[in-house]
Image (cartoon, coloured by chain):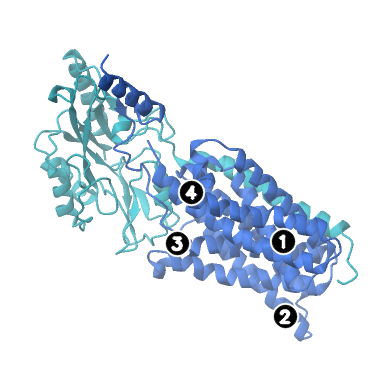
């Protein structure tokens, strides 16, 4: 099986949210509340237990206040966010039941029949993607449409995308396509366009990667995400020394501690 | 320059200084938190307290048994360990989103998951400490030769008990939550000292007045006082939930009850048994508050998280 990926190109996204709707319908994801956020045209706000695709509406005044608020001074970018399907996935490493697995397509998948809702994946994801659904008790996130992929279909969001902003396919081919796209955009003068795929970080790259303009942090895409497993050595090292100190300290106290008369 | 433009420049500078913007660009998606807050409720910090104290009590039981301390101390410490282990399971299961699937915790063993290592530790500790306590009971009530069983189980209980009192620090530290991961090296020591202090205090409140216990209580209180000073001195953004707002208050409250108050009472209470008992009560309260403070600080930290 080839490793598949998502290449989400924000320069092609028109903010139609067809991906959000297609994902909800195919995966039968319940509603995530009907709230007015006031954040541009985005009332979905963030990925979560019941939001597996989320279109961000990044509305900016590039130079705050300069030249008044003329329309030319406002940029409006859209980008469809999704679980990153990390190469070194924090949720997968942390899952104590083995519910979270890597599929034959390279995606990170939560097996709903095994998850017992311990919540450890929630604090282990460096991107705030996984969450526990209160009405269900289990953790949920994008499945990478594992069922559709098994049937030889592309994920629902990519299928529904009308502009080709969400591309699905062989990961290596997508990466090459992304490089070509960047070269083309830079040639057209869109020099602030860049690929976000944290290959240099401990996450080791993601199977869902993005093309965004400007600072990736405006899309809540951290520059240097860290997979928590890198902290294990420090943590267990400290725990071993602490345990040793408790054992030795207790031994010394009892070996040399005088008995009080009342004991 | 017009006054309105001067004011705009001022606003730009303020926005850049406060870290909201760099050259006019927002540094996060409208300030929406990057991370999801921990979903754990009161059961988890309560378990940290109970499991930690039980683990340290099993260590005290084994040490007391090895050094020939009085048998009542060994017995009581074993019972604290067994009772704590008995409480830990239900607390952990109650916090699961699907409690009926708790056995899935023992479906696999994963070294890279502190939660998995913890689940197996709780299981082994529970079995060993319960066996030690009941073998002790059988030995006292009957003439059956089970002393070896009790002592062997007690040693297994102590070995796993050492993990019980410290692994919860790794559990919190090795995550994406900034305030926890920032202190991944401190947390196992912090929780270990808190656990030792609690176990000592429980034994003292049960009427044991061994000097060794008081010495260990002083040691734990000294460490907790130093931890408090260390946390007060931190100025990084990740540690802000420990110093500001409601979680800052709980953290300090837990610190004062775990460190300075029992330390002063134990050191300057001289030979007063009452002072040691007061110190023990303060330590237990401090340990419980400390565990809640760290979990709540984690939730606050996630709410403040930025890419």
- Marks 1/4 in contact by CB < 8 Å: the verdict is no
Q: Quarter-wise, where is residue A34 in the image?
A: bottom left
Is label 2 in a helix, a strand or a loop? helix
Q: Which residue is mark 4?
A: B245
Callout in the foreground (2, 3): 3
Q: Earlier in the sequence, mark 4 or mark 2?
A: 2
Q: Label for residue B137? A: 2
Residue depicted at 36% across the width and 50% down the height: A101
Q: Subunit of mark 2?
A: B
| In this view, the mark in front (1 or 2) | 1
Q: Position of residue B180 (x, y in %)?
A: 51, 45
Rendered-image quadrant of the C terminus of chain B = top left
Which chain has been coloured cyan in this picture?
Answer: A
Do badges 4 and 2 share one subunit?
A: yes
**C-alpha span from label 1 to label 3:** 28 Å
Q: Which residue is mark 1?
A: B59
| Mark 1 to mark 4 CA distance (whole Å) | 37 Å
């Amino acid at each position: 099986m080839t490793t598949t990926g998502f290449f989400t190109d924000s320069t092609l996204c028109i903010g139609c949210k067809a991906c959000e709707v297609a994902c909800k319908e195919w995966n039968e994801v319940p509603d995530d509340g009907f709230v007015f956020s006031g954040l541009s045209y985005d009332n979905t706000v963030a990925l979560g237990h019941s939001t597996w695709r989320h279109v961000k509406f990044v509305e900016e005044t590039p130079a705050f206040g300069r030249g008044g608020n003329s329309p030319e001074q406002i940029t409006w970018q859209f980008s469809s966010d999704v679980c990153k399907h990390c190469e070194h996935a924090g949720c997968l490493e942390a899952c104590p039941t083995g519910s979270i697995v890597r599929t034959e397509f390279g995606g990170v998948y939560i097996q709903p029949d095994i998850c017992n809702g311990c919540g450890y994946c929630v604090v282990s994801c460096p991107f705030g993607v996984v969450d526990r659904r209160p009405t269900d008790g289990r953790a949920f996130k994008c499945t990478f449409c594992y069922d559709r992929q098994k049937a030889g279909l592309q994920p629902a969001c990519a299928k529904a995308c009308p502009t080709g902003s969400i591309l699905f396919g062989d990961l290596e081919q997508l990466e090459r396509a992304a490089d070509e796209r960047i070269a083309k955009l830079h040639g057209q003068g869109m020099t602030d366009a860049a690929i976000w795929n944290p290959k240099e970080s401990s996450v080791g790259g993601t199977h869902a990667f993005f093309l965004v303009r400007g600072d990736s942090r405006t899309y809540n895409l951290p520059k240097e995400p860290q997979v928590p497993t890198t902290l294990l050595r420090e943590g267990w090292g400290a725990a071993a020394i602490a345990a040793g100190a408790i054992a030795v300290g207790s031994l010394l106290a009892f070996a040399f501690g005088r008995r009080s008369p009342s004991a | 320059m017009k006054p309105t433009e001067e004011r705009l420049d001022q606003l730009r500078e303020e926005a850049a200084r406060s870290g909201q913007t760099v050259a006019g660009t927002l540094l996060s998606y409208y300030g929406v938190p990057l991370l999801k807050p921990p979903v754990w409720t009161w059961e988890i910090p309560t378990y940290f307290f109970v499991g930690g104290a039980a683990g340290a009590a099993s260590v005290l039981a084994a040490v007391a048994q090895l050094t020939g301390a009085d048998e009542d101390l060994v017995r009581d410490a074993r019972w604290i360990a067994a009772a704590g282990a008995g409480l830990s399971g239900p607390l952990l299961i109650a916090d699961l989103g699907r409690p009926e699937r708790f056995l899935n915790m023992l479906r696999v063993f994963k070294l890279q998951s502190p939660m998995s290592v913890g689940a197996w530790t709780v299981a082994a500790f529970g079995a060993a400490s319960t066996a030690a306590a009941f073998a002790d009971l059988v030995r006292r009530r009957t003439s059956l030769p089970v002393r070896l069983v009790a002592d062997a189980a007690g040693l297994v209980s102590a070995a796993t008990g050492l993990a019980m009192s410290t692994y919860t620090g790794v559990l919190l530290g090795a995550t994406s939550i900034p305030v926890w991961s920032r202190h991944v090296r401190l947390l196992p020591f912090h929780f270990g000292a808190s656990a030792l202090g609690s176990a000592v205090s429980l034994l003292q409140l049960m009427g044991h007045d061994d000097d060794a216990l008081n010495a260990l209580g002083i040691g734990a209180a000294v460490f907790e006082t130093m931890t408090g000073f260390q946390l007060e001195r931190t100025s990084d953004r990740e540690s802000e939930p420990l110093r500001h707002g409601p979680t800052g208050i709980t953290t300090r409250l837990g610190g004062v009850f775990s460190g300075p108050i029992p330390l002063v009472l134990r050191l300057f209470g001289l030979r007063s048994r009452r002072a040691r008992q007061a110190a023990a009560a303060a330590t237990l309260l401090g340990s419980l508050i400390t565990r809640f403070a760290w979990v709540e600080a984690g939730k606050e930290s996630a709410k403040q998280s930025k890419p």
